[in-house]
Image: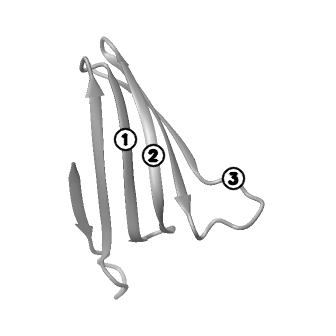
């Protein structure tokens, strides 16, 4: 599990908080979940999954913010990482 406190230096907004956890199976498959409070794009749940294949790591995540306009899809992130 993890907990972060984030402060922006450019303005005087409230502190942001990020809470989350990850479970891993055979050090190859990962599942993640978390919650953001006062993030740059609002507050809400996030969830994701990842798979590692040797040196390549592929992650997919979705952020369910209350700031998303009705009728639009929540932000989805795809990350590809290669370890040298």
| Residue under numbered circle 1 | 32
| Residue under numbered circle 2 | 47
- Estimate the spatial distance between the alpha carbons at disc 2 and disc 3, rounded to whole Å: 15 Å
Q: Earlier in the sequence, mark 2 or mark 3?
A: 2
Q: How many marks?
A: 3
Expressed as whole percent of the image width and height from the top left, the position of residue 23 reads 28, 34
Who's the residue at 30% across and 19% down the image? 28
Who's the residue at 29% across and 78% down the image? 9
Q: Earlier in the sequence, mark 2 or mark 1?
A: 1
Q: Residues within 10 Å of mark 1 (few under 14, many from 20)?
A: some
34 versus 11 height, above or below: above
- Estimate the spatial distance between the alpha carbons at disc 2 and disc 1, rounded to whole Å: 5 Å
| Residue under numbered circle 3 | 73
Q: Earlier in the sequence, mark 1 or mark 3?
A: 1
67 versus 20 height, above or below: below
Q: Nearer the viewer, mark 1 or mark 3?
A: 1
Who's the residue at 30% across and 59% down the image? 19
Along the viewing direction, whichever of 28 and 9 lies nearer the viewer: 28
Q: Residues within 10 Å of mark 2 (few under 14, many from 20)?
A: some
Residue 44 numbered mark, or none: none
Q: Is residue 57 left or right of residue 67?
A: left
User: Picture quarter containing residue 82?
Assistant: top left
11 versus 8 height, above or below: below
Who's the residue at 30% across and 52% down the image? 20
Disc 1 is placed on an element classified as strand
């Amino acid at each position: 599990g993890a907990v972060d406190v984030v402060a922006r230096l450019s303005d005087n907004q409230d502190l942001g908080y990020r809470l989350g956890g990850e479970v891993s199976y055979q050090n190859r498959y990962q599942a993640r979940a978390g919650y953001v409070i006062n993030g740059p794009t609002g507050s809400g749940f996030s969830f994701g999954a990842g798979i590692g294949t040797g040196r390549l790591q592929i992650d997919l995540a979705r952020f369910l913010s209350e700031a998303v306009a009705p009728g639009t899809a929540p932000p989805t992130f795809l990350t590809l990482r290669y370890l040298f």
